[in-house]
Structures are given as C-alpha cells and as structure tokens.
Image (cartoon, rainbow, N blue to C red):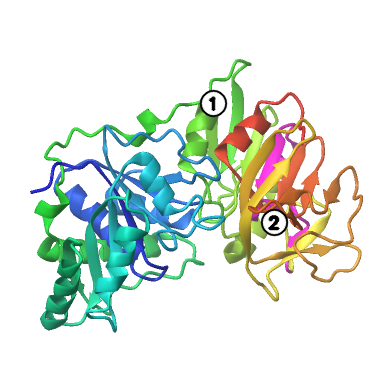
Amino acid sequence: MSPEMNAYLIAAASSGSGKTTLTIGLLRALARRGLGVQPCKCGPDYIDTQYHQIACGRASYNIDPWMHLGSRVKPAEQLTVIEGCMGLFDGADGSAGSNADVAGHLGVPVILVVNARSMAHSAAPLLYGYLHYRPNLRYAGVIFNNVGSPRHAQMLRRAAGEVGFPVLACIPRRTDFSMPSRHLGLDLSERSRISRLADLVADELEAHLDWDILGLPAKSDIQLQAESLEQSPHSGRPLLIYVARDEAFSFIYQETLDRLRALGTLRFFSPLADETVPREADFVYLPGGYPEFFLPRLAGSRATMESLRLTGARILAECGGMMYLARRIDDAPMTGLLPFGTTMQNARLHLGYRTLKRPDGTELRGHEFHYSCIVPRETGKPCNPDGSGFSSVGDGALATRPFLDAQGRPDETGLFCTERIIASYVHWSPEAIVELFTQEKWKL
C-alpha cells in the first residue's frame, strides 16, 4: 500500500477525456466514505467548481498561477482533489502555468486520465512519454476511461505495466456518463442531473478503483481549504458590498467572496428575483453568468434596475453583469447605465487571459470568455468586442486596446469607465477586485 496521500491533481492528455466526470464521481465516493474533501479547479473556470460543490457539498476553489488564483493554497492539512483543465502540460504560454506546474508547485501527485477508446497497447508509449517528459513530476497512477471490455482492460494493464505506470482503474464505457453542455444555466433540474451522475460514477469507482494504490488517509477530521487562504486585511472603514448572485449571475470565484468578506459586510441580491441594492451601499459587484437565458425576467426586474440607477455605490460589472447594465441585450431592455447594447446574434467565442497595465506600473489581471458582442448606439449593428467606433460616450469612454493578452500583445477587449462604473468583458482576479474596491477613487 502506498503511503497516505492527502492531495491529488486529476489531469488528462487532452480535453474530453472525462476529467470532470471522474472528478465529481471521486468527490462523491470520498464524501460517502466520510472523508472531508476539499475540491479545487485549475484555471479560471466557473462551471466545474459548481459541479464540485454539488458532488461533495463544499465550495470549490480555483488555482491558476497566471491569475494568482489560489496562490496561498497549502494542501498539507486537508484532503484536496484538484481537477485540471485541458491537457496536463497545456499552459498560457507553452507549459507555463499548466496543470503540471500546479502539481509541481504544490508537490501533489497526478492522477492521469486516459481516454482508452480505440486504444490498446499504444497506451505504453503514451504513458512512457508522460513519465519521462518531466521526470520530477509524480504520478499516483492512471485511470483508463471508456474501456470496452475486460479483455480491453487486460491489454491496457499490460501496456501500463511495461513502462511501470500504476493502474488505478479501468472504467467501463457507459453511454449515461455524459456531462451537460457547459453553456447551460445550472437550474434545479440540472443540479439534480449532476448529482445523479456523481452517484453513477462513484458506484463505478467503488467497484473498479484500487483504493490501496491511491493511499487515502484514514482520518475524517479534515480542515477546510478556506482556512488556509490568507485574507487581505483592510485598514479603512468596513465596506458594505452587494454581490449579484443567482442563476443568471453565478460566475464568482469562492476566493473573491472570501476576500470581499474581509473588507466589511457582504450581502447578496438577485436580479432575477427583482431584489434591490440600497443607496448606502459602497460597492456593487455584478459578475458574469448567463443573462441571455433569462431575458424576460431580467427585463422585468424594474426594482433592481432602478436601485442600481439610484444607488451611490460604485459598480464593477463583468461580462454578463456588463450586459445587464447596457441598454439592451438583443431586443430585451436592460438597465441603461451603459450607452450601448449587446447581442448574442452571430455569436462567436472570445477567450484568453487579459492584463491591464496601469500608469504606476502595477497590473490588474483577469480573463475573457464570452460569445456576445457590443452593439454601438450610433450604428445599431454588431461590432467586435472592443466596441470599435466609440471614443467618448456620455461621462465615460469605452477605450479600445487597453488590455494585453498572455503573450503581452495588445488585445481589443473594451473597457468602459466612469467615476462610478467599471465595466468590461473581463472577469477580474480576486486580487484585482480587492485592489479596485479598496481605492478611494477608481484608478485604472
């Protein structure tokens, strides 16, 4: 039996191998065994973290070296399961910032997931390459997914044995192991579906996983991950911060909420429920999400929209939150605090890391992930996400090319800024949000 381990990173050769499916199954299986488990996710992801919480009942934290997410995570005192993203060595710039970098930095072994469909002995050179590409990286073992038969499992085990790669499990191919589309809101029915899937996968892991090789700790008095995240102290007066949170606005890092709580009083409101923000609020945080799925309800949230117009709070709006502050989303009228509209027509994906370099040399970091685009008021036609054509609108400006991408090249993501509102398609890092909220004035 292997020595007891208390942290693992689940990675794969590529996306689509079954990392998320197996992660939620493992989280559910560990929770069944009475082991307190803290889930984490590599990269700036808002969807998988919600799946994690459904599977084990604990909020999931994001870890991303480029964004500084989870930079203070110390998995020495709790059982931690970290789900990777993309392939094991895929980073923002080559392998820099990849899952492998996270595993090496934290000193945790990797559980490698291999999609074994249409593969047999070719698994040997694949695993050999992973073992030797970065020799200092530790592997707990491999989970072969989509295994067609017991004979197929034997061939895979033989291949892994030839290169000395431990086999944790051969999971049979099942047509009911399908994740929902990531571009769907997590309503009650979808949450129930994810929970049922977690049970199905946990059953398979109970039947096929070699728990002795995995070497799990026997204790169940595990500390929460939140207790190992240092919170930034705030020397000024306590702030009253309102955060939009419901099915339309759910793209929020748990670390952001932890850090905001350290600044004062944190309260939540739901635009879908037409809840209001008081005039005495200091800040309003409108995160991203799926407002396009709830246009009739959001268009009818008149009390919420009026409170946002009347409050004296500064407003930080990200992606879907910015769309809610705009004049409209397609034909649905929105708050109108921003002098442009947005549209989902001819939608295409815009994504990547973003850096805003400030005049004093400091940086604010974030990432972009959206399908919609801005519609300039002057033309009424969709444009690029930078809002080209705007130079000055009202008391603010939608600046073009204020951001740099992960390679330091200018990016066309637009930024709207007034004395009261900062809005863009960028999802800011927790550090950037705290930096903005603790300034006397907006300073970009």
Viewer can see residue 309: no
Other-residue count near label 1 (Cα within 10 Å), few / some / many at <14 / 14–19 / ≥20: few
Q: Please say if 225 is above or below 439.
A: below
**Badge 2: residue crowd in 10 Å (few <14, some 14–19, many ≥20):** many
| Residue range (magenta) | 306-330
Q: Amino acid at mark 1?
A: Thr
Residue tagged 2 = 323
- The image shows residue 249 at horizontal and vertical percentages of 56, 52
Residue at 68% of width from left, 32% of height from top? 436
Residue 265, label in figure: 1
Was residue 380 drawn as part of the magenta stretch in this picture?
A: no
Assign a secondary structure to mark 1.
Answer: strand
The reply to whether residue 3 is in sight is yes
> Mark 1 or 2 closer to N-term?
1
In magenta segment, residue 318: yes
Q: Position of residue 197 (x, y in %)?
A: 28, 66
Relative to 442, is 254 above or below? Answer: below
What is the three-letter code of the residue carrying label 2? Met
| Left or right of residue 324, residue 266 in this image | left
Question: Residue 66 placed where, x, y %?
Answer: 55, 45
Q: Seen in the image, is 444 located left or right of residue 38?
A: right
Q: Can you give x and y, in whole percent of width and height, for residue 195 in the image?
A: 29, 60
In the picture, which quadrant includes the C terminus? top right
Give the alpha-carbon distance from disc 1 to disc 2, as whole Å.
Answer: 26 Å
**Which residue is depicted at the point 91% across and 47% down?**
394
Residue closer to the observer: 89 or 272: 89
Residue beneath the point at 46% across and 41% down: 254
Front residue of 294 and 370: 370
